[in-house]
Amino acid sequence: IDVPALGDLYNPIITASGGGEVIPDAGNKKVFTIVPQGKECVVGVVSNTNGQNLKIDDVKYSVIPPPRPAIQLMANGKIYDGVSPIPPKSTLQMKIIPDKDFLEKLPADARYEMSQVTVKAQIGLGTPKTIVSQNGTGRDARVGVSLPLGVSLQNAAPGTKIFVEIDKVFRINFKNQKVEESFGMTEKLVGATVGK
Protein backbone atom coordinates (compact mmCIF):
# COMPACT_ATOMS: atom_id res chain seq x y z
CA ILE A 1 0.00 0.00 0.00
CA ASP A 2 1.77 3.08 -1.21
CA VAL A 3 1.13 6.85 -1.21
CA PRO A 4 3.74 8.22 -3.63
CA ALA A 5 2.75 11.85 -2.95
CA LEU A 6 4.15 11.59 0.59
CA GLY A 7 7.48 10.15 -0.56
CA ASP A 8 9.81 9.44 2.37
CA LEU A 9 7.31 10.98 4.81
CA TYR A 10 4.97 8.03 4.27
CA ASN A 11 4.81 5.95 7.44
CA PRO A 12 1.72 3.73 7.11
CA ILE A 13 -0.53 2.40 9.86
CA ILE A 14 -2.94 -0.17 8.43
CA THR A 15 -6.11 -1.49 10.06
CA ALA A 16 -8.63 -4.14 8.98
CA SER A 17 -12.27 -4.12 10.03
CA GLY A 18 -14.17 -6.86 11.85
CA GLY A 19 -11.19 -8.27 13.71
CA GLY A 20 -9.10 -8.76 10.58
CA GLU A 21 -5.39 -9.27 11.20
CA VAL A 22 -2.71 -7.05 9.65
CA ILE A 23 0.78 -8.55 9.37
CA PRO A 24 3.49 -6.05 8.31
CA ASP A 25 6.31 -7.23 6.07
CA ALA A 26 9.65 -7.26 7.91
CA GLY A 27 11.58 -5.77 5.00
CA ASN A 28 9.15 -3.33 3.34
CA LYS A 29 6.92 -0.86 5.23
CA LYS A 30 4.54 -0.68 2.23
CA VAL A 31 3.79 -4.42 2.19
CA PHE A 32 1.18 -6.09 4.43
CA THR A 33 -0.63 -9.39 4.66
CA ILE A 34 -4.29 -8.93 5.55
CA VAL A 35 -6.14 -11.88 7.12
CA PRO A 36 -9.82 -10.86 6.88
CA GLN A 37 -12.78 -11.99 8.97
CA GLY A 38 -16.24 -12.28 7.42
CA LYS A 39 -17.42 -11.56 3.87
CA GLU A 40 -16.23 -7.98 3.70
CA CYS A 41 -13.11 -6.18 4.92
CA VAL A 42 -12.45 -2.45 5.12
CA VAL A 43 -8.73 -1.68 5.05
CA GLY A 44 -7.92 1.65 6.67
CA VAL A 45 -4.78 3.57 5.70
CA VAL A 46 -3.27 6.24 7.97
CA SER A 47 0.20 7.78 7.72
CA ASN A 48 2.05 8.88 10.83
CA THR A 49 3.68 11.90 9.23
CA ASN A 50 5.53 14.60 11.22
CA GLY A 51 4.09 13.20 14.45
CA GLN A 52 0.49 13.39 13.26
CA ASN A 53 -1.81 10.63 12.03
CA LEU A 54 -2.96 11.68 8.56
CA LYS A 55 -6.00 9.72 7.31
CA ILE A 56 -5.38 8.59 3.74
CA ASP A 57 -8.39 6.42 2.84
CA ASP A 58 -10.53 3.38 3.55
CA VAL A 59 -10.79 0.67 0.89
CA LYS A 60 -13.59 -1.89 1.00
CA TYR A 61 -12.90 -5.41 -0.23
CA SER A 62 -15.21 -8.36 -0.77
CA VAL A 63 -13.70 -11.49 0.76
CA ILE A 64 -13.87 -14.55 -1.45
CA PRO A 65 -13.37 -18.00 0.09
CA PRO A 66 -10.51 -20.06 -1.36
CA PRO A 67 -11.65 -22.31 -4.24
CA ARG A 68 -12.31 -25.87 -3.20
CA PRO A 69 -9.77 -28.50 -4.25
CA ALA A 70 -10.63 -31.61 -6.24
CA ILE A 71 -10.67 -35.14 -4.81
CA GLN A 72 -8.83 -37.57 -7.08
CA LEU A 73 -8.56 -41.36 -6.91
CA MET A 74 -5.60 -43.04 -8.58
CA ALA A 75 -5.45 -46.75 -9.40
CA ASN A 76 -2.02 -48.22 -10.10
CA GLY A 77 -0.57 -44.79 -10.88
CA LYS A 78 -3.36 -43.65 -13.25
CA ILE A 79 -6.35 -41.40 -12.59
CA TYR A 80 -9.35 -43.65 -12.03
CA ASP A 81 -11.94 -42.99 -14.73
CA GLY A 82 -14.92 -44.03 -12.59
CA VAL A 83 -15.83 -46.86 -14.99
CA SER A 84 -13.01 -49.36 -15.56
CA PRO A 85 -12.76 -52.35 -13.19
CA ILE A 86 -9.79 -52.29 -10.80
CA PRO A 87 -7.59 -55.42 -10.58
CA PRO A 88 -7.90 -57.09 -7.13
CA LYS A 89 -4.26 -56.54 -6.05
CA SER A 90 -4.17 -52.88 -7.06
CA THR A 91 -2.68 -50.01 -5.12
CA LEU A 92 -5.06 -47.10 -4.82
CA GLN A 93 -4.05 -43.58 -3.95
CA MET A 94 -6.34 -40.78 -2.80
CA LYS A 95 -5.19 -37.23 -3.55
CA ILE A 96 -6.42 -33.70 -2.97
CA ILE A 97 -5.64 -31.44 -5.95
CA PRO A 98 -5.62 -27.65 -5.30
CA ASP A 99 -7.15 -25.17 -7.72
CA LYS A 100 -4.35 -24.32 -10.19
CA ASP A 101 -4.64 -20.50 -9.95
CA PHE A 102 -4.93 -20.60 -6.16
CA LEU A 103 -1.81 -22.78 -5.91
CA GLU A 104 0.16 -20.47 -8.21
CA LYS A 105 -0.83 -17.25 -6.41
CA LEU A 106 -0.90 -18.44 -2.78
CA PRO A 107 1.09 -21.70 -2.51
CA ALA A 108 1.48 -21.38 1.28
CA ASP A 109 -2.33 -21.36 1.60
CA ALA A 110 -2.99 -24.16 -0.88
CA ARG A 111 -1.73 -27.09 1.18
CA TYR A 112 -4.06 -29.95 2.09
CA GLU A 113 -4.26 -32.89 4.44
CA MET A 114 -6.71 -35.78 4.86
CA SER A 115 -7.53 -37.45 8.15
CA GLN A 116 -8.54 -41.11 7.74
CA VAL A 117 -8.91 -42.74 4.31
CA THR A 118 -10.69 -46.09 4.22
CA VAL A 119 -11.41 -48.69 1.55
CA LYS A 120 -14.47 -50.88 2.11
CA ALA A 121 -15.62 -53.83 0.00
CA GLN A 122 -19.19 -54.98 -0.55
CA ILE A 123 -18.71 -58.74 -0.67
CA GLY A 124 -21.94 -60.66 -1.15
CA LEU A 125 -25.07 -59.22 0.45
CA GLY A 126 -23.45 -58.16 3.72
CA THR A 127 -22.54 -54.65 4.79
CA PRO A 128 -19.31 -53.23 3.33
CA LYS A 129 -16.23 -54.29 5.31
CA THR A 130 -13.02 -52.32 5.78
CA ILE A 131 -10.11 -53.89 3.92
CA VAL A 132 -7.52 -51.12 4.33
CA SER A 133 -7.39 -47.84 6.24
CA GLN A 134 -4.66 -45.21 6.40
CA ASN A 135 -4.25 -42.08 8.49
CA GLY A 136 -3.28 -39.10 6.31
CA THR A 137 -2.57 -36.69 9.17
CA GLY A 138 0.73 -34.91 8.60
CA ARG A 139 0.98 -36.06 4.97
CA ASP A 140 0.80 -33.80 1.94
CA ALA A 141 -2.55 -34.69 0.35
CA ARG A 142 -1.29 -33.52 -3.06
CA VAL A 143 1.15 -36.45 -2.95
CA GLY A 144 -1.68 -38.66 -1.67
CA VAL A 145 -2.40 -41.47 0.74
CA SER A 146 -1.46 -44.93 -0.54
CA LEU A 147 -4.00 -47.74 -0.12
CA PRO A 148 -2.58 -51.14 -1.17
CA LEU A 149 -5.40 -53.65 -1.52
CA GLY A 150 -2.97 -56.56 -1.13
CA VAL A 151 -4.60 -60.00 -1.06
CA SER A 152 -7.84 -58.78 0.51
CA LEU A 153 -9.74 -59.00 -2.77
CA GLN A 154 -7.87 -61.80 -4.53
CA ASN A 155 -10.90 -64.11 -4.26
CA ALA A 156 -13.50 -61.39 -4.85
CA ALA A 157 -15.93 -62.02 -7.68
CA PRO A 158 -15.64 -59.68 -10.69
CA GLY A 159 -18.03 -56.79 -10.18
CA THR A 160 -17.48 -56.61 -6.42
CA LYS A 161 -18.02 -53.03 -5.32
CA ILE A 162 -15.45 -51.10 -3.32
CA PHE A 163 -15.77 -47.68 -1.73
CA VAL A 164 -12.91 -45.31 -0.95
CA GLU A 165 -13.91 -42.81 1.71
CA ILE A 166 -12.18 -39.78 3.21
CA ASP A 167 -13.15 -38.81 6.74
CA LYS A 168 -12.09 -35.12 6.67
CA VAL A 169 -10.18 -32.78 4.33
CA PHE A 170 -8.25 -29.85 5.78
CA ARG A 171 -6.62 -26.86 4.10
CA ILE A 172 -3.47 -25.68 5.87
CA ASN A 173 -2.93 -21.93 5.60
CA PHE A 174 0.27 -19.88 5.66
CA LYS A 175 0.09 -19.75 9.48
CA ASN A 176 -0.02 -23.59 9.59
CA GLN A 177 -3.60 -23.49 10.87
CA LYS A 178 -5.96 -26.26 9.74
CA VAL A 179 -9.27 -25.22 8.19
CA GLU A 180 -11.75 -28.01 7.42
CA GLU A 181 -13.03 -28.03 3.84
CA SER A 182 -16.80 -28.38 3.46
CA PHE A 183 -17.25 -31.52 1.39
CA GLY A 184 -20.50 -33.49 1.62
CA MET A 185 -20.41 -37.19 2.50
CA THR A 186 -21.09 -38.26 -1.09
CA GLU A 187 -18.29 -36.02 -2.39
CA LYS A 188 -15.77 -37.72 -0.08
CA LEU A 189 -16.79 -41.20 -1.29
CA VAL A 190 -15.55 -42.74 -4.54
CA GLY A 191 -16.97 -46.05 -5.72
CA ALA A 192 -15.31 -48.58 -8.02
CA THR A 193 -15.68 -52.21 -9.08
CA VAL A 194 -13.19 -55.06 -8.95
CA GLY A 195 -12.30 -56.87 -12.16
CA LYS A 196 -9.65 -59.25 -13.39
Image (tube, grey):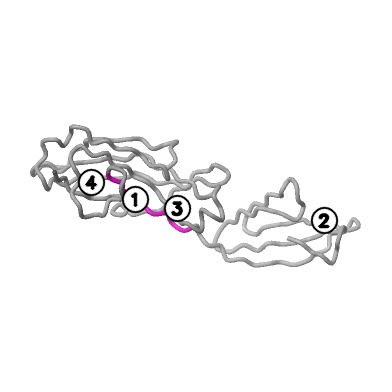
Against 129, is 180 above or below? Answer: below
- State the mark number for residue 98: 3
The circle on residue 11 is 2
Which residue is under mark 4?
Answer: 163
In the image, 155 versus 174, the foreground residue is 155
Q: Which residues are magenta?
A: 67-75
Counting from the top left corner in percent of width and height, residue 61 is at 61, 66
Q: Residues within 10 Å of mark 1 (few under 14, many from 20)?
A: some
Which of the marked residues, 1 or 4, is nearer the chain's N terminus? 1
User: Residue extending furthest top?
Assistant: 151
Q: Amino acid at mark 3?
A: Pro
- Nearer-N-terminus badge (1/3): 1
Callout 2 amino acid: Asn
Q: Earlier along the polypeptide chain: callout 4 or callout 3? A: 3
- Among the two numbered marks 1 and 2 on one chain, the one whose residue lies closer to the N terminus: 2
- Predominant secondary structure in magenta? strand
Q: CA distance from mark 1 to mark 4?
A: 13 Å
What is the CA distance from the residue labelled 4 to the residue labelled 3? 23 Å
Q: Is residue 108 above or below residue 47?
A: above
Q: Which residue is mark 1?
A: 72
Q: Nearer the viewer, mark 3 or mark 2?
A: 3
The residue positioned 21% from the left and 35% from the top of the image is 131
Dot 1 falls on a residue whose secondary structure is strand
